[in-house]
Image: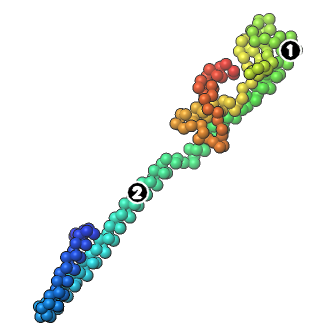
Amino acid sequence: MTKTVTIQEAEQQLTAATATLDQLKAKILDHGPGSVTAEELGTAALAVEHASLTIGHAVKTAETSIEAERQERLQLLKAQILEQAGDVDTALDAMRQIETAAAALIEACAGRQTLIGQATAAMRRDGVPQSSEASDEHAGLGWADAGMGRSDAVYVDGRKIGYVSAGVIIAGALDRASRQAGRSVRHLQPAIDVPVHQDIAQDPEAWLTARY
């Protein structure tokens, strides 16, 4: 098995071979052609050529090793990218779940607006006064017009049923989802601009219980 020679070792070999050849050349110049045979000079010259080629081989081997390491790093990076990027089916399934939930909220909230208007009109026709207090006289029903900071609402046994924006609920859910994922809601911009620190996001059960 051929021993692997490093570039440094090959350079040392070339330095030694070149020094030997230079010494033989100087000897011929100083002592005449009879002091060094042609075979000796040829062997020294071939040693220099061999050492020079050895350097080329060592450089090529080092480059091959570096490229192999680079390809290995790139393969690992590719695998990491594909793993962390997820797949289309997962994203599409999550999107459809959001779509279904949002549609249910939008329909429910839009329906409440119609319900409140119709129920208020019916109560007025049947003489139910404006009040949030439950009264057996009026089957526990009541209603109230919109006022400062509040919407039109109807009351059933003390429960307030007012206008609720589906957008507020969805925004609260996105706020909570962002924090659950360890991200800021600003990560949703510019497509969606979600208000930060909403009451509904802090305690959705309490917020909806008071309004829904």
What residue is at 31 percent from the left and 75 percent from the top? Answer: 56
The spot of residue 181 in percent (x, y) is 53, 37
Q: Nearer the viewer, residue 77 or 39?
A: 39
Q: CA distance from mark 2 to mark 1?
A: 76 Å
Residue shown at 27%/78% (left/top)?
Answer: 52
Could you tell me which residue is drawn at 28 percent across and 78 percent down? 53
Quadrant (top left/top right/bottom left/bottom right) for the C terminus = top right
The picture quadrant where one finds residue 175 is top right
How many marks can you see?
2
The dot on residue 124 is 1
User: Which image quadrant: the N terminus?
Assistant: bottom left
Give the structural element (helix, strand or loop) at label 2: helix
Q: Nearer the viewer, mark 2 or mark 1?
A: 2
Q: Quadrant of residue 28 in the image?
A: bottom left
Residue indicated by mark 2: 73
Q: Residues within 10 Å of mark 1 (few under 14, many from 20)?
A: few
Q: Amino acid at mark 1?
A: Arg
